[in-house]
Image: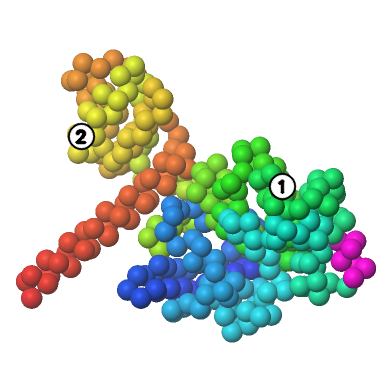
Amino acid sequence: MNPSQENYAITATGLSRRFGSLLAVNNINLKIPTGSIYGFLGPNGSGKSTTIRMLCGLLTPSSGTVEVLGLQIPRQAEILKHQIGYMTQKFSLYDDLTVKENLAFVGEIYAIPRKQRKQRVNELLEEFELSSQAKQRAGTLSGGQRQRLALAAAILHKPSLLLLDEPTSAVDPQNRRDFWVTLFSLAEQGTTILVSTHYMDEAERCHRLAILDEGVIVADDTPKNLGENIDMNVYEVITEKANEARIALLKLAEVFSVTQVGLHLRVLMPKSVADSLQKVEAILHRNGLTGTVAEIEPNLEDVFVAVTEKHRKEQRQERTKGKGQEVVS
């Protein structure tokens, strides 16, 4: 589909949010296509949750414009509430109510007619494999069961947009995989999904991904394109003395970063550096280290390290430049 012909569920321009002197979100621009799974990837404090709360009308932007499902936010946030589902990292249903009572209560909140509500609750109990726990109090469920219940509640009213704020942080890998199977099914049915995460494997599953750092979007593309467009060569170093090799490599000015994974090292070198593979091999040789060096395809973690470190370096340079100008003036 030509981007100019796409329908967008969310459009944000110049979106910023301040908390006193803290600029939590800084001039973000977003276009999220309808029916896609769009991811926010970033560390704690990068602005993911703050952005999501502005998009659904829970927070008023300090500046910028937001349109969600054709509605102007926050002005029409009350109308939007009935068209979105919102699932947070923290379990937000009632521990003292049973699974079925929680779902029925959510159905009442959205004013779903009684007969239709009963049918929808039963559908979700079966779909999310919670029928045998229907009369069990939510507070006694396992982590995976609580997650399924929370997602069932978020989609009970069949929202057009689903906002998920780090929804899988408290569950095991198997439950995370099952959770994503459900998300892909919802997207195929036309639901637009915005999910924030700090898990690389989850981020790779998104149709499109924005990497946030210190309130700024530092990269925005498909996971595949992000990897192909990284301005780094990535080398795998295999040596029995991986820690010694890591320390030696970090002393080379041209080395951007070194990550140790078991006995392997992943070394990032800017593409502008000539003969970078030979330079890595020379460092090993000079330090009496034996091993192999091979160029490999970048993964999403490599992309994340490259774009966030580049952004932070630019920020440090800006601050240093600003202080220098103050001294001159």
Q: CA distance from mark 1 to mark 2?
A: 52 Å
- Residue closest to the far right: 115
Horizontal relation, residue 266 to residue 191: left or right:
left
Quick one: 311 or 127, which is closer to the camera? 127
Please report whichever mark, 1 or 2, sits nearer to the chain's N-terminal start. 1
State yes or no: discs 1 and 2 in contact (Cβ < 8 Å).
no
- Region in magenta: 114-120
* Residue at 80% from the left image edge and 71% from the top image edge: 108
- Residue 328 falls inside the magenta stretch: no
Residue type at tag 2 = Leu
With respect to residue 66, does 276 lie above or below?
above
Question: Residue 157 at x, y = what percent?
Answer: 78, 66
- Residue closest to the far bottom: 75
- The 10 Å Cα crowd at callout 2, few under 14, some 14 to 19, many 20 or more, is few
Give the SS element for disc 1.
loop
Disc 1 or disc 2, which is closer to the eye? 1
Quick one: 161 or 81, which is closer to the camera? 81
Quadrant of the rendered structure where residue 279 is?
top left
- Quarter of the image containing the C terminus? bottom left
**Label ID, residue 74:** none
Residue bearing the label numbered 1: 141
Quadrant of the rendered structure where residue 252 is?
top left
Question: Residue 297 at x, y = what percent?
Answer: 45, 34
Question: Residue 148 at x, y = what percent?
Answer: 72, 50
Horizontal relation, residue 254 to residue 28: left or right:
left
Question: Residue 208 at x, y = what percent?
Answer: 56, 54
**Label ID, residue 252:** 2
- Residue closest to the far left: 328
* Residue at 58% from the left image edge and 46% from the top image edge: 170
With respect to residue 257, does 25 lie above or below?
below
Whether residue 175 can be seen here: yes
